[in-house]
Amino acid sequence: MEPDPPESATAEAAPPLVKRHRLSTRIWHWVNALTVFVMLMSGLMIFNAHPRLYWGEYGANQDHAWLEIGSAPDRGFLRIGSFRIGTTGLLGYRVTDRGIERRAFPGWATIPSTYDLAGGRRWHLAFAWVLAIGLIAFWIASLVNRHAQRDLAPRRSDLSPRRIWHEIRQHARLRFPTGEAALRYNSLQKLSYVAVIFVLLPLVILTGLTMSPGMNAAWPWLLDLFGGRQSARSIHFIVAVLLVAFILVHLVRVLLAGPLNELRAMITGWYRVPRDREVKP
């Protein structure tokens, strides 16, 4: 009969579980995930009503758009400035069982799935309240429990170009932090989270308000801040694209870093610390 393994071997086989995410962070994360998902899809429905973007105060069919998703007689296209690429079957022009569909974004990517501008606006504005109130609540909670100051605020060493370049190389090699380092946000995480929470989300909310005629009357300074309603609409679209890019990178990182461990941490708060890599002599 073999002897029981020593305690050190057992500890090595099962790295410790630690409390990583507070309840407020976990609730905000999942509510925000649903909210952003609905807002993006309903936003695409609204965009389908006029799939062109302009700079300045005004923009209509006869004005020059800097971005357009449209269709020719037998093909779809995306035009950005003078650059134009074909998007047949994906954007602008699709052949379906019901015939030819000439919409910028397909029904599977929008809420509602059939063309309904009023419905899209109702979904979008309802969840915009959830986004705005949730963001303010998260700001307050993070300042009170010092999550923002302790975990998110970059230190001077985090902003070192050498440090940032090192972490970019480590991520490119799929070498993620282990041991105690895995319990702290690295420089790239801090910079990206600060950009999303304190720049992109407020910006998408403010540009959304700028497109509202009622808010134009109440807060006319928004029009001056963003250079007009059409400029606000363009910035709103660009920020939404940046948020999608962040979400995709975030999901890829979760999958590569260990999805079960990452999901457990964001659902229960408990995170199993990855074992330190062995240092080669």
Image: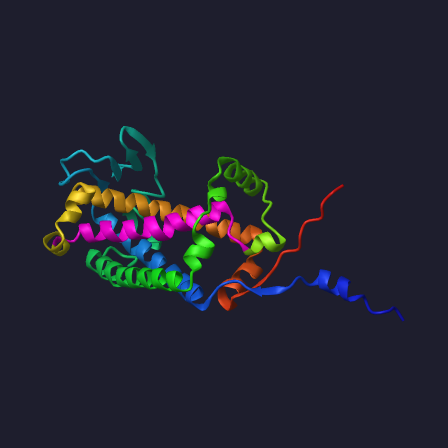
Q: Which residue lies furthest to the left in this view?
A: 217
Out of 39 and 227, give the one closest to the viewer.
227
241 relative position to 256: left or right: left
244 relative position to 43: left or right: right
When the figure is inspected, residue 6 is found, relative to residue 96, above or below; the finding is below
When the figure is inspected, residue 25 is found, relative to residue 187, above or below; the finding is below
Residue at left 41%, top 56%? 148
The segment highlighted magenta reads 184-213
Q: Which residue lies furthest to the bottom in this view?
A: 1
Q: Residue 73 appears at what percent x and percent y? A: 25, 36
Q: How is the image coloured?
A: rainbow
Residue at left 27%, top 57%? 114
172 relative position to 43: left or right: right
The majority secondary structure of the magenta stretch comes to: helix
Residue at left 19%, top 37%? 55
27 relative position to 39: left or right: right
Q: Residue 2 appears at what percent x and percent y? A: 88, 68
Q: Residue 218 appears at what percent x and percent y? A: 11, 56
Out of 10 and 84, give the one closest to the viewer.
10
Q: Which residue lies furthest to the right in this view?
A: 1
Q: Residue 235 appears at what percent x and percent y? A: 26, 43
Quarter occupied by the C terminus:
top right
Residue 58 falls in which quadrant of the image? top left
Q: Residue furthest front?
A: 156
Is-magenta flag for residue 8?
Answer: no
Res. 164 visible in picture: yes
Res. 102 visible in picture: no
